[in-house]
Amino acid sequence: LMASGFLYDYKSLLPIEGVTVGFYSDLSDSSIYKTYPAKIAKTDKWGYFVVKNLKKIPYRVFAFLDINANSKFDIENEKSAFIDNFITPSKAMRKDSPELAYTDIKDTAACLARPKELDLYLFKTPSTRQYIKNSGRKERKMMFRSFSAPYPKIDSIGFEGLQMSKIIKQFNPTRDSLVMWINDTTYKAPDTLYLNVKYHKTDSLNRLTPFKERVELIAPRVKKAQEKPKRNNFGQKENKKPENLIDLKIEAAADNIEHQGFVLNFPAPLIKSAIDSISINFISPKGQKGVEKFEFSRDTALVCTYYIKPKNKIRQGFEYRLNIPAKTFVDIYGFVNDTTLKSVMLPNDEKLGKISLNMTDVEGNYIVELTTLSRDRVLKTINVSKDGIIEFPYIAPGKYSVRITSDANRNGFLDTGNLSEKRQPEKVRLYRMSNGSSVIIIEESMEIVQEVNIKNIFAD
């Protein structure tokens, strides 16, 4: 008997060549760690594999990128994939079997049309050994600490001589990295701070046990001021910017301003925001001017990121100007922003196209991405949690793909799997046109509307 299938990278959905696909007659969960496969095959350029000479018995199916070529899985270094259920082969090997027929590897259509029974998605299991991996102090009032594995079990965190009520904390999505700021402008932070962390650490027997660790955090050295002021070509002293200015970064993209607006990134948390002094002005293609109403909000996870989003629908060919007067914002150091002007011009190019997707049967949260054809670059991301139309405007002629992630835990990013816990990575699928192709071709001035039934896409 035989069994065939395709293997893909769980995130990009691109095929991976040279991966070992193993069928294990040992049905225990630990078979991939302790035994060798009964039968193996290697994936080709298109991720395709055929495992031959199988018996009509149940098998566990694992795949792994065999870096050290020992035909055995090494969890610390190698990516893996698995099938949830036991697989009992049923296809007989015959001379005329299309799975065994020669296929020119350069013939894309023929290679992708080969019969398959299994789909595997390769991922890397995160480290399970838990300990404090790194810690430090980038500024006198800014500290960081990171763990070696995601989702650590933390019982308590506290500074010696400093109340935690004066600390602003920001975890990353997997909670293995923490940044902390001292939210007290009157507090004179000493050169050395001590942080006590009570958490569950991996011991010598690979068990998580309660542990208390005292972390020393030393303030960075202060750079020496320049002894002589810089002078210009005329021998005049150059005007130095005040040292108490916030280094504010503003992002604004024409194809994303309707969904995100202007994105403001501050180096430290704010303690004051004079929103009423901010304004957004627009200029039409005919030179007409006006004031745009907006919404101001902070990111739900990033304490130093804010959004200024126009309330009304963005109009093609208009220029939008964000005006932020000096001293609108004050951060935890008492620093203030300088006068800032940021503008974005909405294209009026008739050659640009647009993709509209009518999302139906949406149950849960999904991340919809417009990517390049090679899927190595994400051009735009939209989070979807209900039925409705989403748009990708201002698209240059070319070939694209739409990648959809089932964000089951609603954390806003794709979670990898865990082999030891038998947990698959979150599902990622490509939207396919009515002809079965995942390639969306946009020509000049083309606007396409597609129906996307989420339930059908994730039916497998």
Image (cartoon, grey):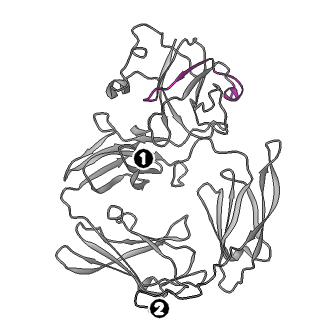
Instruction: Report the number of numbered marks.
Output: 2
Q: Which quadrant holds residue 197?
A: bottom right
Q: Locate residue 34 relative to residue 348 in the image: left or right.
A: right
| N-term mark: 1 or 2 | 2
What is the three-letter code of the residue carrying label 2? Lys
Q: Residue at the location (44% across, 53% down)? A: 385
Q: Locate residue 9 relative to residue 107 in the image: left or right.
A: right
Q: Residue at the location (82% across, 41% down)? A: 205
Residue 237: numbered disc:
2
Q: Position of residue 25 (x, y in %)?
A: 65, 18
What range of the chain is rendered magenta?
A: 28-47
What is the three-letter code of the residue carrying label 1? Asp
The answer to whether residue 273 is magenta is no
Q: Which quadrant holds residue 270?
A: bottom right
Distance of mark 1 from mark 2, alpha carbons?
48 Å
Q: Residue at the location (19% across, 53% down)? A: 445
Q: Which quadrant holds residue 458?
A: top left
Residue 376: numbered disc:
1
Helix, strand or loop at mark 2: loop
